[in-house]
Amino acid sequence: MPRPNPIAEYLDAVRLAFAFDPALAERMRREVADHLHEAAVAAGGSWAAEQQAVARFGDVRLLARHHAAPVLLARMRGLAVVLIAALALVFVAMELRVAWYGWMQWTASDELKTINAVGLPLDRWTFFAALALAGAGWAYIGSRHAPPAFDTAYARELGRCLTLCAAAAAALTTVVAVETALTTFRLATSWSSAALVPALTMAGEIACALVLLRRLRAALRGAATARALFG
Amino acid sequence: MDSTPRLEGEMLKGHLDMIVLAAVAAGPAHGYAVIQEIRRRSGGAFDLPEGTVYPALHRLEQKGLLGSRWTTADSGRERRVYALTKRGQRALADHRTVWQRFTAAIAGLFEEPAYAAPKSDR
């Protein structure tokens, strides 16, 4: 039976332990590979030297826990920034569209007025809810500090951050969905070249929501993986 | 039992960022070289588990005190090399000033007896 390769085994363990951040896992794997090979060569390059290099490097799970705490908090802060930016951009797009309708004297049909009577208050209050949740999330995330290593208490804090961000993202996605439905109905009933501006602003809102959801999914995955590994 | 505190315990962890900055100040270096420099310049007193230097290197990079880039070593392996940034140089100078004041104060304390023995009336 072939003798296991200590460095290769350790590098596999690095990839697994840093699974909460695939880009960091790859960077660590490459850095640790260089480190261990150099240490093994300095100690003679034998199989025993490789084993000694691995032993001197330390517990890979502990190393990953030290990295996980600041990395996940930074990701959560990035998510909060994207959330606030998405809210601001969606608001600007909505206002721009309304101003455009006014400027073009684009009045709503009776049918659209009936739909707007339900859609617009829902849109407005859901946007306010998204704003309040994002503000709470921003304040909570801003007041957190990364401990020296990832632990269960920290996992709970990250869970609260994610809950607030996810709730705000869900509310904002609802806003964008309602806006899309109302705008599509308006454009479908009276299409002209003036429809380009509402269509573009709508596309911008959808892009904001998609970017936000993608960041949220990455943050959720990272936190869930870290909890599974170290929680 | 020896009650002398070990240098490589909590004392060392609290100053790891400063130690790493000081080691990188000698010139651009990869993780293994940083560890070797710390060991050499501390006369072997700071003998850390070698992996512990990486969270510090990454943290200092995030703070903008270190910069890093991939290079290729003579062996052909990829290597991440770290170097002090201007901010890092200023931070290290600040650390050095504070540390010199601190060690001078501690040295002053240790030169005096821990406490004066009470005078006997008899």
Image (cartoon, helix red, strand yellow):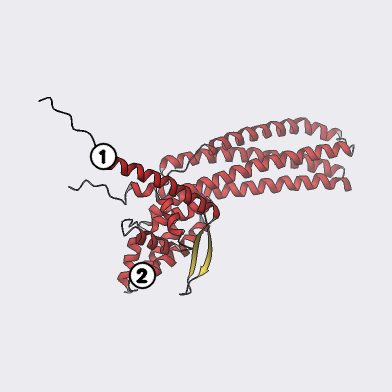
In this figure, which residue is indicated by the disc labeled 2?
A40
Q: Quadrant of residue B105?
A: top left
Toward the left, the furthest residue is B122
Residue B5 visible from this viewpoint: yes
Q: Position of residue A108 (x, y in %)?
A: 85, 35
In the rendered image, the residue lying farthest to the top is: B121
Along the line of sight, the residue nearer the viewer: A122 or B101? B101
Q: Which residue is mark 1?
A: B112
Apparent side of residue A205 relative to residue B10 in the rendered image (left or right): right
Q: What's the chain of the residue with tag 1?
A: B
Query: Between residues A198 and A40, which one lies in front from this camera angle?
Result: A40
**Residue occupying the point 55% across, 54% down:** B86
Specify the label residue A23 is tagged with: none
What x and y, as percent, mark residue B39? 35, 60
CA gap, disc 1 and disc 2:
48 Å
Task: Please count the marks in the image.
Answer: 2
Question: Type of residue at label 1?
Answer: Glu
Q: Nearer the viewer, residue A231 or A122?
A: A231
Specify few, some or many for label 1: CA neighbours under 10 Å numbering under 14, 14-19, or 20 or more. Answer: few
Q: Chain of mark 2?
A: A
Question: Which type of secondary structure does the marked residue at label 2 adopt?
Answer: helix
Residue B34 rendering spot, x and y as whole percentages: 42, 61
Which residue shows up at 77% across the image and 39% down it?
A: A182
What is the x, y in percent for residue B117?
18, 32
* In this picture, residue A194 sits left or right of residue A65: right
Report the amino acid beneath label 2: Ala
Instruction: Tell me, yes or no, if residue A173 can be seen here.
Output: no
Give the residue drawn at x 62%, y 32%. A132
Occupied quadrant, residue A139: top right
Query: Which quadrant holds the C terminus of chain B?
Result: top left
Provide the secondary structure element on which disc 1 rests: loop
In this rendering, would A156 be left or right of A96? left
